[in-house]
Image (cartoon, rainbow, N blue to C red):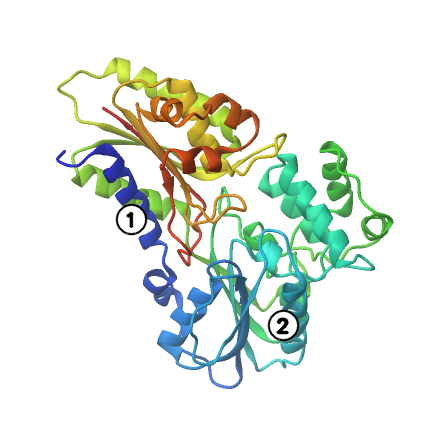
Amino acid sequence: MSEQPAAVLRQLFQRAVEVADPMKSLAAFLPEKPDGRVVVVGAGKASARMAEAVEDVWGPCEGLVITRYGYGRPCQGVEIVEAAHPVPDEAGLAATRRMLDLVGSLEDNDFVLALISGGASALLIAPAGEISLSEKQDVNQKLLNSGAPIGQMNTVRKHLSAVKGGQLAAAASPARMLALLLSDVPGDDPAEIGSGPTVGDASRSEDAKAILEQWGIAVPVSVQDVLNGNTGVLSPQSEALSEVTNTIFAAPSQSLEAAREMAQDAGCDVEILGDALEGEARDVAQTHADLALERKRRRSGSDRPLLLLSGGELTVTRKGNGVGGPNAEYALALALALQGTKDIHAIACDTDGVDGAAEVAGAVIGPDTLAKAEAAGVSAADALADNDAHTFFEKIYDQVVTGPTLTNVNDFRAIWVG
């Protein structure tokens, strides 16, 4: 290989993002524009790009899409509203109410195209019952800090919402609906993407209460009242969902396969560890470090480099006060576990360009990471203890900063074993 490992790893990440770009992947799943009234709605970090791709084929459309601040796109007819993520805000609340009013005006010969991607859980915000926005924000932040898996977080979000768990689709009934989904969840379950606003869910409010108790999350009376009653989450068999078709048009597996092909063309052997990995970021990093070291011991100097690829969604149980995210924390823990082992490099990034709450996709590491940190006067161990991985990598100039990628198929990790 003529290029340095770090450059190859960055190119692999760029390829994974490129394949998931809705402008390249959505059109093949779009039917001919139906006759009659057509309304486009959506939410998520990729939703504005998805709307742009739709109008590239269908022309100007009526509709409303909510995306993250900085992720808007110029659309011909669809209105794009930017709001806060990962903790919702008033802009998201007002836009969601308008969206529910819009689809609530439809009739049985109308058609809805729903565009849902990761991030919709926070951007599509309509608290159930008497829950206030500030109370919903507080519960959401506590879930993010708890280390709970994304599936459990989404279960709670659904039962505290008037729009998730199939409720957006129910509001549009009796109109026909096609939901195009960009998966960012392990296992590609449509009910988990953006907390499933167009998909029914078999969970119960008792499940949400058990999750809050498991992670020690205290909630106000308004939340207790909602969970003690009948929430609006629809059963998958609900008649209100009978005119809904949910289709995943892009997923993490496609991005990993594209990276595999590129790595093989570049002269690497490739092993995919899975596209749906979950767990505590630092624990998965230790497992992957052990695996990389074992693979290195088995290889000879004449072997081609080996790439270990993986996707999914890792979590961080926040105990410190630093600035971090699961990908940067994984990279930091991996560097500590490898202790400067020669010829092992890695990248860990979120394909949406945002790792945690920071405007940073992730980081790269190599055999010199800890030496660079020592020269810069920063401690990798202290940074990990304080959940301060982004600050650590900023100081040694090994962050990966992409800006808005306009897509989201979750984590991308690659370990280069020479």
Mark 2 = which residue?
A: 99
Answer with left or right where residue 26 lies relative to residue 237: left
From the viewer's side, name the closer residue of 221 and 91.
91
Quadrant in the picture for residue 286: top left
Three-letter code, disc 1:
Arg
Task: Residue at 68%, 61% (x, y): give it.
Answer: 238
Q: Label 2: how many residues lie within 10 Å, few (<14), some (14-19) or many (20+)?
A: many
Vertically, is 282 above or below 105?
above
Vertically, is 347 above or below 36?
above
> In the rendered view of the protein, which quadrant contains the N terminus?
top left
Q: Is residue 176 among what the camera can see?
A: yes
Q: Is residue 152 among what the camera can see?
A: no
Q: Label 1: how many residues lie within 10 Å, few (<14), some (14-19) or many (20+)?
A: some
Q: Secondary structure at mark 2?
A: helix
Mark 1 = which residue?
A: 15
Q: Secondary structure at mark 1?
A: helix
Q: CA distance from mark 1 to mark 2?
A: 34 Å
Q: Which mark is residue 157?
A: none
Task: Residue at 66%, 60% (x, y): give it.
Answer: 89
Which residue lies most toward the top here? 297
Q: Position of residue 371 (x, y in %)?
A: 34, 22
